Amino acid sequence: MDENSLHLLLENYTALLKRVDGHIQHIEKKYAAAIVCKKGCDTCCKFLTIFPVEAFAISAAFIKLPKKIQAKVIQRLKNQDDACPLLIDKACVLYSARPIICRTHGYPIYMERGKKPLIDFCPQNFKGMTSFPKDALISIDPLNTLLIAVNRHFLDSIEATPPFPERIPMSNALFILNEID
């Protein structure tokens, strides 16, 4: 798949990322003093699975990395620990291409469980805060609904036999473009 075709296929996903990033920037600006997540904070950087649309975006970014960095990531994969293989020297080597879960982790996530509102965030952030205005929350259920719709549209736009699984481990996502060419 050529780069231009992939770019067109990822347009909806890229637009969603811009919306998420815009909201997170608003939260960061408003609560800068209460957010301790910075480069080097890697507690939440665990091995995870992502949607196929995210896998293609990650793979496209991975193949653009210098070969030396790719080799470090591949070596981390061989170690098979539960840390994200993209975490090198306590920093994500694909930070700008990270999936939505990585973009939102640590920020105030609003969800409802059994019609009961729940707000969750990294315990290192927002110490002493007991409530948040609505504009400081990431409403995870609608966000996930949008991501699922974007992923479905993406999958409907490509032909794959066999079809892609619902979730792809990061270890496979990095190389997904190599598998379809």
Image (cartoon, rainbow, N blue to C red):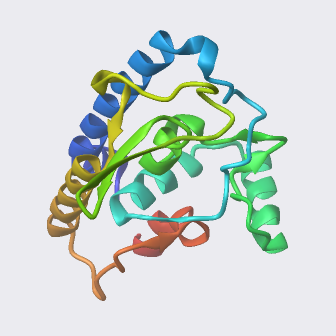
Tell me: 105 left or right of 72: left
Q: Position of residue 8 (x, y in %)?
A: 22, 45
Q: Residue at x 41, y 70 (%)?
A: 181
- Residue at (25%, 35%) from the top-left corner? 15
Pick the residue in front: 178 or 139.
139
Residue 164 coordinates in the image, percent (x, y) = 34, 78
- Residue 98 location, x and y as percent? 52, 44
Q: Quadrant of residue 124?
A: top right
Residue 63 visible? The answer is: no
Q: Is residue 153 above or below residue 127?
A: below
Q: Foreground: 105 or 147? A: 105
For residue 30, above or below residue 54: above
Residue 30 vertical position relative to residue 82 in the rendered view, above or below: above
When the figure is inspected, residue 152 is found, relative to residue 59, above or below; the finding is: below
As drawn, is 157 to the left or to the right of 73?
A: left
Quarter location, residue 18? top left
Name the spot of residue 78 as percent of width and height, x first.
80, 73
